[in-house]
Image (cartoon, rainbow, N blue to C red):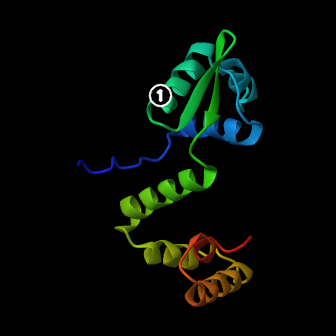
Amino acid sequence: MGAKPKSRPLTPLELEIMKVLWEAGPGTVEAVRARLPGPQKLAYTTVQTMLNVLHRKGKVKRALRGRAYEYRPVVTREKAASVAIRDLINRLFGGSAESLVMSLVEGRELTPEKLDRLKRLLKESDSAPQGKEARHGNN
């Protein structure tokens, strides 16, 4: 058996397309294209190509509805965020989540209120069984 392929973070354009699908639900190429932000609309074929790339990567599924494919997300926003954060930690902080947090603290990116919340979450996760709720809180 081969190793599971490494999950890669979404590119900026893939992320914008996924945001449309997460927020608006399943949609055709034209529906996704119409909801993409920005003053300049992307070409239909660009959005179609990107949705096909996401489909090949297993990030979206598609089903034929009439004459057009309808795309829906397979990967959750939380999973995409987790992969992106893990990639950031690996690339910029040598795999150390602690270094990421220290960078946020030292750069004053975390207010005292946010630090207090982080401390509470850490305390709760120490006393809770290891699972999704323990890692992410119940918020």
Place of residue 89 in the rendered image (x, y in percent of width and height, measured from the top left)? 43, 64
User: Which residue is at a point 56% across and 32% down the rendered structure image?
Assistant: 61
Place of residue 108 in the rendered image (x, y in percent of width and height, measured from the top left)? 62, 76
Q: Quadrant of residue 127?
A: bottom right
Residue occupying the far top of the picture = 67
Crowding at dot 1, Cα within 10 Å, few <14 / some 14-19 / many 20+, comes out as: some
Image: 105 above or below 87: below
Q: Which residue occupies the foreground of this view, 107 or 22?
A: 22
Left or right placement of residue 36 versus residue 106 in this view? right
Place of residue 38 in the rendered image (x, y in percent of width and height, measured from the top left)? 71, 30
Left or right placement of residue 51 versus residue 9 in this view? right
Q: Quadrant of residue 62?
A: top right
Q: Which residue occupies the foreground of this view, 73 or 108?
A: 73
Place of residue 110 in the rendered image (x, y in percent of width and height, measured from the top left)? 65, 75
Image: 20 above or below 48: below
Q: Which residue occupies the foreground of this view, 38 or 11?
A: 11
Question: In which quadrant of the rendered image does the C terminus lie?
Answer: bottom right
Q: Which residue is mark 1?
A: 53
Q: Quadrant of residue 25?
A: top right
What's the amino acid at mark 1? Val
Residue occupying the far left of the picture = 1
User: Which residue is at a point 61% across and 49% down the rendered structure image?
Assistant: 76
- Classify mark 1: helix, strand or loop: helix
User: Which residue is at a point 63% across and 15% down the rendered structure image?
Assistant: 44
Image: 115 above or below 5: below
User: Which residue is at a point 66% across and 9% down the rendered structure image?
Assistant: 67
Image: 138 above or below 19: below
Q: Which residue occupies the foreground of this view, 111 or 54?
A: 54
Left or right placement of residue 32 versus residue 99 in this view? right
